[in-house]
Image (cartoon, rainbow, N blue to C red):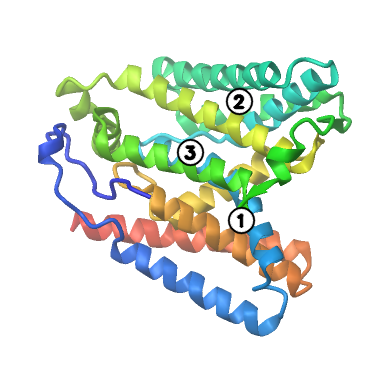
Amino acid sequence: MPENTTTAPVSAITKSSIPKVSTLNTAHLGLIAVIIVAVIITSIGTDSFLTANNLVNVLRQVSVLAVLAAGLTMLMISGGIDFSLGSNLAVTMGIVAQMLTLEVDTFLAIMIGLVCATAIGFVNGLVVTYTKVTPFVATLATATLLDGLALLVIDGLSVSAQNKLYEFGNGAVFGIPYILLAAIVICVIVGLVLRYTAFGRNTFAMGGNEEVARLTGIPVARNKILLYSAGGLLAGLAGVMMLARLGAASPGVGGLALELQAVAAVVIGGTALVGGKGSIIGTVLGVLLLGIVANALNLLGVSSYYQDMSVGAVLLIAAIMNVVQWRRRKL
């Protein structure tokens, strides 16, 4: 999947000034090596890991996280962050499920859910841009509000999607799940935007130095709002995908737990915590690693408590490595 992995200097706002870089960098190759090692170890520990059914199941499970992480990648490259994406996903699931229960047309129900999700992202963008509240604080507060709203929408009960999204969530073409194809298309689009558009180049420039980016004429405020709105839209799409896969909107699905997995995937993939550097390929590799580890622990019969601990441990290690790499670049 194409994307820009280079920290963009603010002066580099034209396509011709961006250096030609390889699609895969050393960090990506190292991450691929870790994934291969994880696959080999798991394959030795259990015979069921490399079966076709299990591999398809893993890819289907990580598809939702990949879409959520794609939106977060754009935001973190720009120097921002949104901790409410997982909660936005839960709200979207509830809205669409309730619409389907009321016999609203499936396409219309999905559109209503996506509009609401985008509006939530838009409001986050306005708050972060014009109140100057730290994105971490603003979006964490929004996440708390949305967690409550998600429960309110479904009244604390599981709400069935009436099997209207079953084919999308469980069907496949040539053995490839529809939900996986959707995730691939979305990640490719995000990668193309980051690499080949002025908006993408400006996103890297904003993450490199927001004030200098503003002085060079980049519409920072407008781009911030667009980025948060796009993040909200992708969270909504991930919510529709999750609803299709599970068949119902239920309490406890999504929220901060899923958001932290997305953050872990993005950081593992090499996106800088301070902005200005990142890649969709890295994020996708991070998502795959988390999916493989979770599946391996399940197959090996490891307690779910340890699974949660593993995500936290991987995130901490990735964050430390991220900071170390950033300090080396500064030397």
Residue nearest the viewer, comparing 257 with 197: 197
Q: Quadrant of the C terminus?
A: bottom left
Checking the image for residue 142, the label placed there is 2
Residue 251, percent from left and from top? 81, 36
Q: State the CA–CA distance, disc 3 to disc 1.
A: 15 Å
Residue nearest the viewer, comparing 136 with 112: 112
Q: Amino acid at mark 3?
A: Ile
Residue in view at x 83 percent, y 16 percent:
103
Residue in view at x 57 percent, y 20 percent:
120
Image height of 14 relative to 117, above or below: below
Answer with mark 3 or mark 1, whichever residue precedes in sequence: 1
Q: Which residue is mark 1?
A: 59
Q: State the CA–CA distance, disc 1 to disc 2.
A: 30 Å
Contact check, label 3 and label 2, Cβ < 8 Å: no
Residue nearest the viewer, comparing 193 with 147: 193
**Badge nearest the viewer, 1 or 2:** 1
Image height of 35 relative to 118, above or below: below
Q: State the CA–CA distance, disc 3 to disc 2.
A: 25 Å
In the rendered structure, the answer to whether residue 81 lies left or right of residue 1 reads right
- The secondary structure type at the circle numbered 1 is helix
